[in-house]
Image: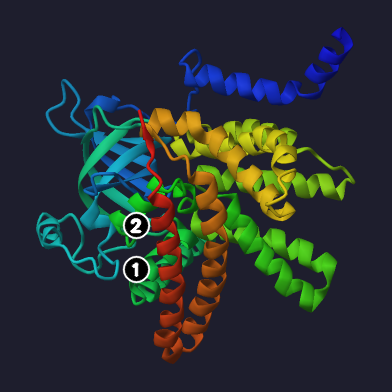
């Protein structure tokens, strides 16, 4: 008995360490410090101006009045006691800023704001250009401390005015600007496809500006909200499509390298959200292990990804998607595998369906504690919704990506392809609404 316990402990010690660390953080026993936090000669509470470069893709807040993003600060300004005029200081490190919606969406299609003229009148934006408010763009912000707002372990500020400066002229700056232009071009293309384009945009880039509140609420009630968040499902689907195409052209070996390159390209374009970064780290670990002739277990890969991501991007742990992603994967690796033999014994359920059902069930139960604490509800039909909606979304993504590529090359086909996309969108929404009829448990 003692030997068996020792064997189990030694086998899962690494996984247990990750679980204990996560539990202690959730209970508030330990905290994670962000090493790249803002450092300046001006006290943080006295800062009124920031010259900074956007370091993460802006995310819209729940009230819809602003966008939240992380910035790399290069200069600060503010009033210091004993000085008559404002003082400026060089700075480095990161801060969290809340930027007005009109500034971020200035170039978005269909987003016209009367506030924008007021912002321009106060010189918030230069008259010659509205600016691309994407990752890599540099701004001069007039700010005040955002007391009481989410900070993710960083000093937080509310932006009142924003002057667009631009992108760096270096190669890195040009690559960042290329990404920003491509993302904006995709938004303009998909905007013409209406609600279907909005859903496709959310699945490809994580931008939910054109996804209606009703659609998001239906996904949440159905227990399928994770489908809208960029995760390993989207990464595996994108790399799988690349693998299929490259395999037909260059063979099996080229396909494996091409699939990984496609995964990296997708993360670069969509943005390294915590859940997507976790998926890329896991894919990298699996690729390295395969090249060394090893077959790693999912719990070990998950635990290793947890600690690597914690070292590479410690601010990720403050994001809800970080907790949901790891909790769901942990549920799949433990609960899903435990219930799989029981579900497979049912004579009325095909084996492949039973495997998918047990996996969805494990992911839902694994993420249940986080869902209950954060959202105060639990959708019991989430497993069924995932099984029903995920295949439809996979087809929707595949067809939508191909349609977008064809539309860029041949704009005349944009309208008929949009009809196909909207037909698939209708099927997805009806399936989601059907699953949403299962009443959630509220706490």
Residue beneath label 1, please? 195
In the image, 313 versus 386, the foreground residue is 386
Residue 215 numbered mark, or none: 2
Looking at marks 1 and 2 on the same chain, the residue that comes earlier in the sequence is marked by: 1
What is the x, y in percent for residue 311? 60, 31
CB-based contact (under 8 Å), mark 1 and mark 2: yes
Q: Which mark is residue 289?
A: none
Question: Residue at 34% of width from left, 68% of height from top?
Answer: 195
Residue 401 horizontal/vertical position (percent): 53, 72
Q: Check the picture and name the quadrant holding the C terminus.
A: top left
| Helix, strand or loop status at disc 1 | helix
Give the residue displayed 57% in from the left and 38% down from the top: 328
**Residue extending furthest front?**
347
**Residue at mark 1 to residue at mark 2: CA–CA distance:** 9 Å
Q: Is residue 440 above or below residue 373?
A: below
Residue closer to the observer: 115 or 346: 346
- Of residue 123 and residue 244, the one placed in the foreground of this image is 244
Viewer-nearest residue: 17 or 378? 378
- Name the colour scheme: rainbow
Residue drawn at x 9%, y 58% as measured from the top left: 118
Residue 230 visible to an observer of this rendering = no
Local secondary structure at mark 2: helix
Q: Can residue 26 be spotted in the picture? A: yes
**Residue 336 higher or lower than 399, as above or below:** above
Residue 419 picture location, percent across and down: 41, 81
Asked which quadrant contains residue 268, the reply is bottom right
Q: Dot 2 surroundings within 10 Å: few (below 14), some, or many (20 or more)?
A: some
- Binning the other alpha carbons within 10 Å of mark 1 as few (below 14), some (14 to 19) or many (20 upward) gives some
Q: Residue furthest bottom?
A: 412
Q: Provide residue 50's location: percent of width, then percent of height.
A: 29, 41
């Amino acid at each position: 008995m003692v030997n068996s316990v020792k064997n189990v402990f030694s086998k899962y010690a690494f996984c247990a360490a990750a679980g204990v660390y996560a539990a202690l953080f959730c209970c508030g026993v330990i905290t994670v410090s962000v090493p790249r936090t803002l450092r300046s000669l001006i006290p943080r509470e006295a800062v009124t101006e920031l010259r900074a470069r956007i370091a993460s893709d802006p995310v819209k807040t729940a009230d819809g009045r602003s966008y939240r993003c992380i910035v790399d600060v290069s200069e600060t300004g503010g009033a210091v006691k004993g000085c008559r005029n404002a003082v400026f200081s060089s700075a480095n490190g990161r801060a969290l800023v809340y930027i007005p919606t009109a500034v971020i969406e200035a170039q978005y299609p269909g987003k016209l704001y009367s506030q924008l003229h007021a912002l321009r009148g106060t010189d918030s934006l230069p008259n010659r250009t509205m600016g691309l408010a994407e990752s890599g763009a540099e701004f001069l912000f007039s700010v005040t401390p955002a007391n009481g707002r989410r900070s993710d372990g960083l000093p937080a500020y509310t932006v009142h005015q924003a002057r667009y400066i631009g992108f760096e002229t270096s190669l890195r700056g040009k690559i960042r600007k290329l990404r920003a232009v491509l993302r904006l071009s995709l938004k303009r293309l998909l905007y013409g496809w209406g609600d279907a384009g909005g859903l496709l945009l959310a699945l490809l880039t994580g931008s939910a500006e054109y996804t209606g509140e009703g659609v998001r609420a239906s996904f949440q009630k159905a227990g399928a909200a994770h489908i809208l968040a960029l995760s390993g499902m989207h990464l595996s689907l994108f790399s799988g499509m690349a693998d299929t195409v490259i395999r037909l052209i260059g063979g099996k070996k080229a396909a494996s390298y091409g699939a990984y390159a496609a995964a990296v390209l997708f993360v670069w374009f969509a943005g390294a959200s915590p859940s997507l970064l976790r998926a890329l780290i896991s894919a990298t670990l699996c690729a390295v292990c395969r090249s060394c002739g090893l077959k790693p277990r999912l719990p070990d890969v998950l635990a290793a990804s947890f600690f690597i991501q914690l070292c590479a991007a410690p601010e990720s742990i403050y994001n809800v998607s970080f907790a949901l992603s790891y909790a769901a994967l942990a549920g799949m690796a433990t609960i899903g595998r435990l219930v799989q033999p029981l579900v497979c014994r049912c004579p009325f359920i095909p084996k492949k369906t039973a495997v998918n059902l047990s996996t969805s069930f494990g992911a839902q139960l694994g993420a249940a504690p986080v869902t209950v604490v954060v959202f105060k509800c639990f959708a019991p039909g989430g497993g069924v919704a995932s099984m029903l909606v995920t295949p439809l979304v996979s087809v929707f993504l595949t067809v939508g990506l191909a349609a977008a590529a064809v539309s860029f090359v041949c704009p005349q086909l944009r309208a008929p392809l949009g009809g196909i996309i909207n037909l698939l969108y209708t099927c997805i929404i009806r399936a989601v609404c059907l699953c949403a009829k299962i009443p959630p448990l509220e706490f």
